[in-house]
Amino acid sequence: MLARFAISNEWQVALVNPGQVRQWIKAIGTRGKTDRLDSQLLARYGAEVHPPLWTPPPEEVEPLSHLLSRLDDLKKMLRAEKNRQHTSNTQPVCSKTARESIDKSIAFIEPQIEIVSKAILEHFQNHPLLAHKAEPLKSIPGIGEKKVIPLRVLLEQFSTLTHGSANAKQLTAYVGLDPVDHQSGSRVFRRSTISKRGNKRLRSQLYVGALGGIRGNNRLRHFYHRLVEKGKSKKLALCACARKMLVWSWAVFNTDPSFDAAVGNPAFGADETAR
């Protein structure tokens, strides 16, 4: 709200990661914390670091993002309540009032999920630009009707955030699918993994999409089996496939090509090897 107010008044706005600012403040040796000191440090951070200016996403994207977040919250609540329901049903002694409360909660949440899901679909269909740009994404293995909307929103947000100048490697880091090594000298502390920073919901959806995508006769399946044959674990290979899907999606989003999932497209570059 404040950022949009500032933009409407033609102020220059930068939305920065609070964790990065906190680490920067520690790095310069600041120990105290007061409102006056915080404002001075934020001003100094802006003057020395020069964070990129923020541009608000298109108006049709932000409401969709809020709806997707709400749907995710409702699904988490439903899972939690169903777990409680299962626990209460397996316990020999459980309060009748508690069971009835859980049942009522589930009965309330389930229709809300349907309402929000319907609102997401209607909003998406009522904005032709969103729907049109989403169609090419569906040609990518593992990207279906359920995953294309949150993916479409994220790509639009990332493009706006980076003013369209970012590359696929930066996008994978933004989502948290970038590989992270743990090594010092000749010692390897533990197996390489992904950073798991960024959009957890989309990261999970891409992983699940990779599970389905490798079942067809397409580039993703060949990529997956090639990694497994090289000795990579199946989980690591699936993470690499999720990253591959994201890279392809970014290329489709930027160039809008005709993507042939069976034979691939040279414009997408060579398949990288997972670590």
Image: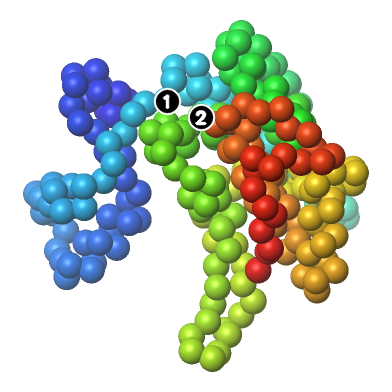
Any mark on residue 156, and which?
Answer: 2
Q: Amino acid at mark 2?
A: Glu
Give the residue displayed 52% in from the left and 52% down from the top: 169
**Mark 2–mark 1 CB contact (< 8 Å):** yes
Few, some or many C-alpha atoms within 10 Å of disc 1 (few <14, some 14-19, many ≥20)?
Answer: some
Residue at the spot 62% in from the left edge and 45% down from the top edge: 247
68 or 52: nearer the viewer: 52
Residue 160 at x, y percent in the picture: 42, 31
Between 43 and 78, the one nearer to me in the picture: 43
Q: For the point 64% across and 16% down, which residue is it? A: 132
Q: Position of residue 175 (x, y in %)?
A: 55, 48
Residue corresponding to mark 1: 57
Query: Mark 1 or mark 2, which is nearer the start of the sequence?
Result: 1
Above or below, 9 relative to 267: above
In the image, residue 11 above or below residue 94: above
Q: How is the image coloured?
A: rainbow
